[in-house]
Image: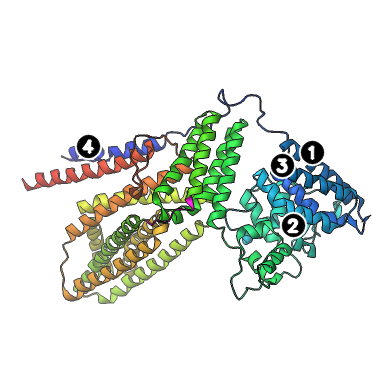
């Protein structure tokens, strides 16, 4: 009989095991340029990157003032640098074939420098040209994620303080050996710099100086962190919160200097102070939804262009950045307005990445890119809300707190009842101590999880995927055994044994440890489930909170009625119903977890064009999500039939 049961258990879990095995089949590496890609183009172009041309234009606008004053050269080195950079900028730009208007203005900048005209003229022309030139070159000039100034400070100390000094005064330990000397970030001229220029300096370095490129050693987000931190080093930096909210966005802060921002606010009828701008420098707001979509569109276009140049690996990286930094953050808001459009946008992005990975033709990749671009244009126009998703999130939230809370309450009740019946009420305080300790540690666990979520988009996507898969595994186990009512009975027997041992020995520590284990186990499961639910259904946050609040009220009411009034709850149906609901949640979390890890390329994507999508249950058109979810469903059903079969045998 034991052998038969083990064989049945193995067969029951076999569908889930098959689904899991499919996830671990190695993902294909991004396709390199093959016969479908042009052979004539090199892997890495020798031409200067467009972003560096923008940096040169910014550099001319800010540093020309250190080269010429009142028509006289005040620094031969700086002036020669201005001549060289303006010539490089003009020649490289001509190769790109910009509109004649832009080319004429670049020629005018070069002429003004040759004529040693005033800095205000050169700066005015560069500021006027920058937005149009950036748009023409498709250069992204702002971060997708709010810069972390604390991390920026740490990175500045590690990478910049040696030359620029800990306080940014340009007097670091190596400064005396450098010619020209490092820039002082305390200089009032910092009011004329934008973080984007500092970001570009960190990215490309500064020719003719000892400033190196940090493109390889620091990520894009880390360079933005440093750039925004440097803006706080200016002497006189004095952040003062404005009395009313100012119309300043993350993009404004990234691409404009303090002087420009003050001028813009004055033109809008606001009387700002630099101290207000400083406040936003220290507390930058998040990017707007429109800014994020523009950023995604820019990176997607860059991805398509890179693929056309035979740089498939770079194309795949840019496509992933476009989704993680520009689309994924707006999905909750988009899903609230039009869930179908959100799902279609995500699906088309996935197919675009698959085209890149599978070595599709340049024409096919370009066509797919255009279809995704069109969807992103529609994304901001969606207005309808999805009540079905919110209702489903509410039911899941309610089921989690009721099931986990009821089990903890019942198990603690067993302990307290045993102690009272045996005349050991003085030991009940140890149970309370264990419960309090578990609650405190549970709160700390939740805090650690929240801290871990404050990371880069790719790391956060990976964490969300792994958290959801872990939650699915635990939920599958909980729901699978909850229906069989083995889990609760085993816990009760374990607690009886511990309580009897504690009463015999008079040891309160054993009781406290058991109470701690009971509550902390349920607390961690609850935290894990709610965190995964929140990640998946952030747009339904209100429904999740309502489910939690209502479930908690119902739970306390049931516990009160059970122990004060003697109400008997039919526990078998209760755990069966909540077990089914949590099993459904395991099904959903498994699909979501696989989808998140597919997004970042950790799990391969095999499309199933014929597959029907059902976004509320995370049913997606890929072999991997379908196999795992189908495995969970089959194992669940087989487990239920096995249980019925076992009970029929027992009654004979």
Pointer 4 local density, CA inside 10 Å: few below 14, some 14–19, many at least 20: few
Pointer 1 local density, CA inside 10 Å: few below 14, some 14–19, many at least 20: some
Which is more foreground, mark 3 or mark 1? 3
Instruction: Report the residue at 57% width, 40% height from top.
Output: 317
The stretch of residues the image draws in magenta is 379-385
Q: Earlier in the sequence, mark 1 or mark 2?
A: 1
Pointer 2 local density, CA inside 10 Å: few below 14, some 14–19, many at least 20: many
User: For the residue labelled by badge 1, is the local secondary structure a helix, a strand or a loop?
Assistant: helix
Where does label 4 land, which residue? 7
Q: Earlier in the sequence, mark 3 or mark 1?
A: 1
Q: Which mark is residue 91?
A: 1
308 up-or-down from 276: above or below: above
Residue 175 in view of the camera: no
What is the distance, in whole Å, between disc 3 and disc 1 at their CAs? 14 Å
Q: Is residue 384 magenta?
A: yes
Instruction: Report the residue at 16% width, 71% height from top.
Output: 567
Query: In this image, 591 relative to 578: left or right?
Result: right
What is the distance, in whole Å, between disc 2 and disc 4 at their CAs? 65 Å
What is the distance, in whole Å, between disc 4 and disc 3 at their CAs? 74 Å
Marks 1,2: beta carbons within 8 A: no
Q: Earlier in the sequence, mark 2 or mark 4?
A: 4
Residue toward you, 386 or 543: 386
Which is more foreground, mark 1 or mark 2? 1
Which is more foreground, mark 2 or mark 3? 3
Residue 1 in view of the camera: yes
Marks 2,4: beta carbons within 8 A: no
Query: In this image, 89 relative to 521: left or right?
Result: right
Magenta-highlighted stretch: main secondary structure? Answer: loop
User: For the residue labelled by badge 4, is the local secondary structure a helix, a strand or a loop?
Assistant: helix
Instruction: Report the residue at 22% width, 69% height from top.
Output: 558
Q: Is residue 68 magenta?
A: no
């Amino acid at each position: 009989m034991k052998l038969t049961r083990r064989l049945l258990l193995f067969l029951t879990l076999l569908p889930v095991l098959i689904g899991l095995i499919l996830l671990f089949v190695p993902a294909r590496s991004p396709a390199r340029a093959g016969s479908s890609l042009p052979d004539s183009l090199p892997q890495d172009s020798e031409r200067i990157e467009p972003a560096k041309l923008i940096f040169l234009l910014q550099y001319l606008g800010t540093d020309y003032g250190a080269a010429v004053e009142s028509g006289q050269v005040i620094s031969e080195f700086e002036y020669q640098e201005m001549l060289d950079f303006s010539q490089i900028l003009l020649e490289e730009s001509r190769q790109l074939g910009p509109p004649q208007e832009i080319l004429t203005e670049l020629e005018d900048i070069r002429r003004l420098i040759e004529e040693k005209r005033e800095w205000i003229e050169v700066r005015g022309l560069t500021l006027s040209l920058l937005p149009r030139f950036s748009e023409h070159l498709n250069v992204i000039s702002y971060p997708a994620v709010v810069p972390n100034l604390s991390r920026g400070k740490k990175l500045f100390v590690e990478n910049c303080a040696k030359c620029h000094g800990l306080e940014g005064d340009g007097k670091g330990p190596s400064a005396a050996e450098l010619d020209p000397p490092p820039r002082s970030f305390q200089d009032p001229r910092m009011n004329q710099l934008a973080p984007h220029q500092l970001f570009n300096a960190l990215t490309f370095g500064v020719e003719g100086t000892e400033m190196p490129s940090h493109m390889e050693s620091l990520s894009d987000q880390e360079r933005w962190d440093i750039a925004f931190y440097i803006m706080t080093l200016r002497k006189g930096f004095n952040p003062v919160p404005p009395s009313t909210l100012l119309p300043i966005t993350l993009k404004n802060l990234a691409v404009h200097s303090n002087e420009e921002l003050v001028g813009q606010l004055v033109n809008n009828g606001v009387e700002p102070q630099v101290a207000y701008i400083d406040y936003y420098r220290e507390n930058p707001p998040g990017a707007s939804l429109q800014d994020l979509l523009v950023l995604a569109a820019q990176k997607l276009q860059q991805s398509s262009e890179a693929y056309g140049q035979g740089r498939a690996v770079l194309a795949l990286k840019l496509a992933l950045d476009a989704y993680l930094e520009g689309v994924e953050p707006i999905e909750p808001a988009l899903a609230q307005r039009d869930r179908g459009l959100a799902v279609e946008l995500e699906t088309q992005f996935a197919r675009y990445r698959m085209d890149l990975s599978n070595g599709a033709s340049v024409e096919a990749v370009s066509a797919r890119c255009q279809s995704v671009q069109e969807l992103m244009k529609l994304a901001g126009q969606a207005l309808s809300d999805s009540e079905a998703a919110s209702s489903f999130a509410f039911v899941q939230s309610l089921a989690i707190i009721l099931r986990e809370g009821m089990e903890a309450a019942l198990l603690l009740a067993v302990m307290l009842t045993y102690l009272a019946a045996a005349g050991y009420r003085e030991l009940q305080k140890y149970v309370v101590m264990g419960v309090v300790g578990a609650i405190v540690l549970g709160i700390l666990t939740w805090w650690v999880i929240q801290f871990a979520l404050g990371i880069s988009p790719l790391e956060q996507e990976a964490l969300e995927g792994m958290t959801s898969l872990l939650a699915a595994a635990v939920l599958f186990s909980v729901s699978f055994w909850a229906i069989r009512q083995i889990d609760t009975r085993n816990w009760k027997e374990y607690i009886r044994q511990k309580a009897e041992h504690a009463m015999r020995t008079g040891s309160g520590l054993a009781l406290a440890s058991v109470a701690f284990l009971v509550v902390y186990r349920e607390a961690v499961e609850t935290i894990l489930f709610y965190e995964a639910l929140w990640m998946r259904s952030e747009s339904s946050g209100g429904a999740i909170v309502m489910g939690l609040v209502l479930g908690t009220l119902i739970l306390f009411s049931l516990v009160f009625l059970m122990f004060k009034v003697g109400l008997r709850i039919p526990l078998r149906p209760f755990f069966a119903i909540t077990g089914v609901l949590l099993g459904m949640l395991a099904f959903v979390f498994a699909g979501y977890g696989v989808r998140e890890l597919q997004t970042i390329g950790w799990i391969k994507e095999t499309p199933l064009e014929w597959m029907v999508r059902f976004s509320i249950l995370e049913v997606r058109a890929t072999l991997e999500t379908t196999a795992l979810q189908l495995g969970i469903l089959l194992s669940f059903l087989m487990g239920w039939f096995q249980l019925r079969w076992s009970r029929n045998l027992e009654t004979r």
